[in-house]
Amino acid sequence: MIFFESLKAYKDYDPAAKSYLEIALLYPGPKALFLYRLAHPLYQMKFFFLARLFSELGRWLTGIEIHPGAKIGRRLVIDHGMGVVIGETAEIGNDCILFHGVTLGGLRFDPVKRHPTVGHHVLIGTGAKILGPVHIGDDCKIGANAVITTDVPAGTVVRITSTKV
């Protein structure tokens, strides 16, 4: 049921999507999330090798790396997807959108919470790097190529601007 809910989220989000069959078979995000949804319960049951096998298959097929230990809510949309990395202790709320090249990564190798927690209804732009055990509040928008290492309050828009050199 959650797989069909995910397909509907893609269809609602992407005006280029012509059918559910197209999304299920040709979009990388749903495939990566489907394999994650198989791997995550295995990881929780401590079948680590099998969980990582599904995770690696997802990475190989889609270019999206989701650690099976991550906690992902419902209706996540990963747009284009190539290069997305979601670390082991990352948590993502419901109804979020990640663009290609997004990293939810760690800054340490200690066995503690070391990846971000992302609230509900968060959009994270292309190439953004959110690093460490930071919290991104609900309804935030993180701009393309932003590097976030501190908490971001709910409803915040983080813009990265550039100037000509």
Image (cartoon, rainbow, N blue to C red):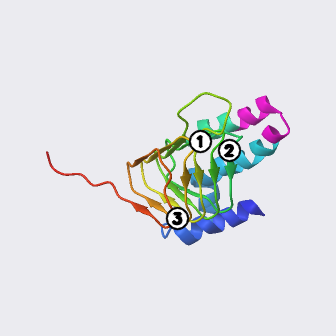
Region in magenta: 42-54
Q: Position of residue 110 (x, y in %)?
A: 63, 28
| Residue under label 3 | 154
How many neighbours does mark 3 have within 10 angstroms: few (below 14), some (14-19), or many (20 or more)?
Answer: some
The amino acid pointed to by label 2 is Ala
Residue visible at 39% across and 56% down in the picture? 143
Q: Nearer the viewer, residue 43 or 54?
A: 43
Q: Residues within 10 Å of mark 1 (few under 14, many from 20)?
A: many
Report the residue that reaches farthest toward the left.
165
Mark 2 near mark 3, Cβ–Cβ under 8 Å? no
Judging from the image, what secondary structure is the residue with disc 2 in?
loop
The amino acid type found where label 3 is placed reads Ala
Q: Residue furthest right?
A: 45
Residue 19 in view in this figure: no
N-term mark: 2 or 1: 2
The image shows residue 157 at horizontal and vertical percentages of 41, 63
Total labels: the figure holds 3
Tell me how far mark 2 sits from mark 1, CA to CA. 9 Å
Say whether residue 22 is visible.
yes
C-alpha distance separating marks 2 and 3: 21 Å
Q: Residue at x 60, y 27 (%)?
A: 109
Up-down relation of residue 143 to residue 50 (above or below) = below
**Residue designated by label 2:** 70
Q: Nearer the viewer, mark 2 or mark 1?
A: 1
Quadrant of the frame with the N terminus: bottom right
> Which residue is under mark 1?
115
2 or 3: mark nearer the eye: 3
Q: Quadrant of residue 95?
A: bottom right
